[in-house]
Image (cartoon, rainbow, N blue to C red):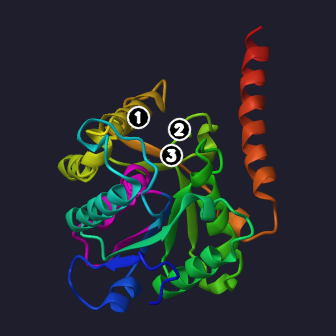
């Protein structure tokens, strides 16, 4: 597979043939930054772990530059951080037994540029080569510009792929904003309580972020525990750890504007709150 950016790379943890590894994919996550995959798609990672009939591939779009840093990383340059974060992502792929990990090495500015068609073409090639059943990416209500830009580029790429070759499911996930605000019937439930040791190991790999001043490991685990407990007020917890997703398969397979699509869900939440207050007033 040919990449546009010279720093882009593919890592195959098994050491096998690259294209065969990509073609074996059943579940794929396309994320903005190193560690986003492990935060938002752990349900898929754990469900593929050690299986013979399910295989997980990760795609990291940006180059890892520009992340906040402190402590031992405080004086590291963006070039230093790019190398460190790329290596951390490869370590995560090894621990999680991904069939492949692709890092496309785009600067965030290029991802956020709507006129940049190169990324769309590259994502199309990857999705067609992988032919996954389910694709995970960032949610449209995320508050990080680069995350939302990646989601929009994924949608554009999928819409350029013939319908029969698109993933059967496209799920958007939590990182820089929870999806707890969605009405319950609109949530896709993604259990994250499988292999808790694996989850901790995957999040713990990212020392440049944790020691660098961002406790994503604790925050992610806390959100998942909170989701599991606060999901149902009148029932015992079905799982110990849970992530929420939003199914956007319908959006991908239509020409609906993404802003209109997410607005409908925001309106559903608004109406649910107003109706409940009205019924109790």
Q: Residue at x 26, y 36 (%)?
A: 71
Q: Secondary structure at mark 3?
A: loop
Q: Are marks 3 and 1 in contact (CB under 8 Å)?
A: yes
Q: Secondary structure at mark 2?
A: loop
Q: Which residue is mark 3?
A: 174
The image's mark for residue 71 is none
Residue sitting at the far left: 197
Task: State how far apart marks 1 and 2 are (Cα).
Answer: 8 Å
Residue 50: give x, y in percent of width and height: 21, 69
Question: Relative to residue 188, is residue 73 drawn left or right?
Answer: left
Quarter of the picture holding the N terminus: bottom left
- Could you tell me if residue 193 is visible in this image? no
Tag 3: Cα neighbours inside 10 Å, few (<14), some, or many (≥20)? many
Q: Toward the viewer: 16 or 267?
A: 16
Q: Which residue is mark 1?
A: 223
Residue 190: give x, y in percent of width and height: 44, 51
Residue sitting at the far top: 281
Tag 1: Cα neighbours inside 10 Å, few (<14), some, or many (≥20)? some
Of the two numbered discs 1 and 2 on the same chain, state the one appearing first in sequence. Answer: 2
Q: What range of the chain is rendered magenta? A: 33-59
Does 5 sit above or below residue 19?
above
Number of labelled discs? 3
Tag 2: Cα neighbours inside 10 Å, few (<14), some, or many (≥20)? some
Residue 167: give x, y in percent of width and height: 56, 75
Task: State how far apart marks 3 and 1 are (Cα).
Answer: 10 Å
Of the two numbered discs 3 and 1 on the same chain, state the one appearing first in sequence. Answer: 3
Q: Quadrant of residue 157?
A: bottom right
The image's mark for residue 178 is 2
């Amino acid at each position: 597979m040919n990449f546009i950016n010279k720093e882009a790379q593919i890592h195959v943890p098994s050491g096998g043939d690259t294209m065969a590894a990509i073609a074996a994919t059943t579940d794929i996550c396309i994320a903005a930054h190193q560690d986003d995959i492990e935060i938002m798609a752990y349900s898929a990672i754990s469900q593929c772990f050690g299986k013979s009939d399910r295989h997980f591939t990760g795609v990291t779009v940006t180059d890892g530059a520009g992340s906040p840093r402190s402590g031992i990383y405080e004086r590291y340059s963006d070039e230093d951080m790019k190398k460190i974060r790329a290596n951390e992502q490869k370590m995560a792929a090894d621990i999680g037994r991904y069939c492949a990990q692709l890092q496309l090495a785009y600067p965030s500015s290029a991802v956020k540029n709507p006129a940049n068609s190169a990324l769309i073409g590259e994502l199309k090639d990857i999705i067609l080569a992988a032919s996954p059943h389910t694709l995970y990416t960032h949610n449209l209500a995320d508050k990080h510009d680069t995350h939302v830009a990646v989601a929009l580029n994924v949608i554009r790429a999928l819409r350029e792929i013939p319908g029969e070759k698109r993933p059967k499911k496209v799920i958007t996930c939590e990182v820089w904003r929870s999806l707890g605000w969605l009405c319950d019937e609109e949530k896709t439930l993604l259990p994250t309580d499988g292999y808790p040791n694996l989850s901790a190991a995957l999040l713990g790999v990212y020392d440049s972020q944790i020691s660098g001043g961002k406790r994503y490991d604790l925050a992610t685990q806390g959100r998942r525990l909170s989701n599991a407990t606060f999901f149902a007020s009148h029932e015992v917890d079905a799982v110990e750890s849970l992530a929420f997703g939003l199914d956007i398969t319908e959006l991908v397979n239509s020409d609906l504007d993404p802003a209109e699509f997410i607005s409908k869900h925001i309106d559903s939440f608004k109406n649910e709150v107003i109706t409940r207050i009205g019924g109790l007033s």
